[in-house]
């Protein structure tokens, strides 16, 4: 991939790699983190963490290298923790405290609909070139990422992000599950949960 393609192509939020590195460091140590980022040819992003949106290709390389380098269960645990950390970052720095306060006090169906709408408006930051849809059917929520560029089968990073946002803003009892994945040939990465 050329430098201009990286510069001009779809972008995602830097936490896709920053929090992956942090979760790897904590769980596996710096040497393993360096090995994963070296395998993904993104070590420069480990050494000099990005402060702006990054080409989705960088996140793709880092996440695929994670699953290629570690055992499947370990890679999934790291990716999920990175997703939780990304959710924490969003809650701390991107979602206004007044909006959080309001979501926590509104009737649950209204709060869920508002949160899904907000996530949809910002989906490009975690879905890149993929397409986001979401709907609520009573207390059941279905989120789809079509043509998800970060699909890793399973998509534990996305699962962790959704888990953290809904457990902190809607109900602590939520458990997000990925029920199908583009990485396994499905039409979308589908996340389902009850609120």
Image (cartoon, helix red, strand yellow):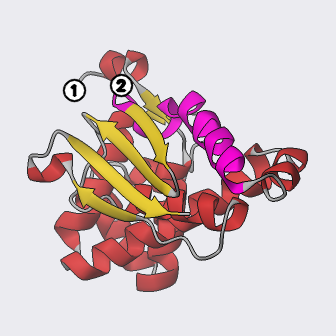
Residue 147 is drawn in which quadrant?
A: top left
Residue 37 is drawn in which quadrant?
A: bottom left
Q: Is residue 82 left or right of residue 171?
A: left
Query: Does 17 sit above or below residue 70?
Result: above
Check if residue 111 falls in the magenta segment: yes
User: Helix, strand or loop at disc 1?
Assistant: loop
Please tell me which residue is depicted at 49% across the width and 65% down the height of the picture: 82
Q: Residue furthest left?
A: 185
Q: Position of residue 42 (x, y in %)?
A: 36, 49
Say which quadrant the N terminus sits in.
top left
Pick whichever, 80 or 109, lies toward us: 109
Cα separation, mark 1 vs mark 2, equals 7 Å
Can residue 51 be seen in the rendering of this structure? no
Q: Position of residue 61 (x, y in %)?
A: 28, 47
Tags 1 and 2 touching, CB below 8 Å = yes
The span picked out in magenta is 108-131
Q: Position of residue 89 (x, y in %)?
A: 68, 57
User: Which residue is identified by label 2?
Assistant: 6
User: Which residue is identified by label 1?
Assistant: 1
Of the two numbered discs 1 and 2 on the same chain, state the one appearing first in sequence: 1
Q: Main secondary structure of the magenta part?
A: helix
User: Helix, strand or loop at disc 2?
Assistant: helix
Query: Does 65 sit above or below residue 189?
Result: below
Say which quadrant the C terminus sits in.
bottom right
Can residue 99 be seen in the rendering of this structure? yes
Please tell me which residue is depicted at 87% across the width and 55% down the height of the picture: 101
């Amino acid at each position: 991939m050329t430098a201009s393609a990286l510069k001009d192509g779809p972008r995602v939020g830097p936490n896709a790699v920053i929090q992956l590195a942090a979760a790897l460091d904590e769980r596996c140590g710096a040497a393993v983190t360096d090995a994963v980022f070296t395998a993904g040819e993104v070590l420069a992003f480990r050494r000099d963490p990005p402060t702006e949106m990054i080409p989705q290709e960088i996140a793709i390389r880092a996440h695929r290298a994670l699953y290629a380098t570690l055992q499947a269960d370990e890679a999934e645990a790291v990716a999920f923790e990175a997703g939780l950390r990304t959710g924490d970052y969003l809650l701390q720095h991107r979602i206004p405290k007044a909006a959080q306060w309001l979501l926590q006090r509104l009737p649950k169906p209204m709060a869920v609909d508002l949160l899904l709408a907000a996530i949809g408006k910002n989906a490009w930051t975690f879905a890149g070139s993929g397409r986001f849809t979401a709907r609520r059917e009573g207390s059941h929520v279905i989120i789809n990422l079509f043509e998800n560029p970060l699909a890793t089968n399973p998509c534990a990073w996305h699962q962790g992000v959704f888990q953290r946002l809904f457990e902190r803003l809607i109900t602590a009892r939520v458990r997000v599950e990925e029920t199908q994945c583009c990485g396994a040939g499905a039409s979308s990465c589908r996340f389902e949960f009850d609120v």
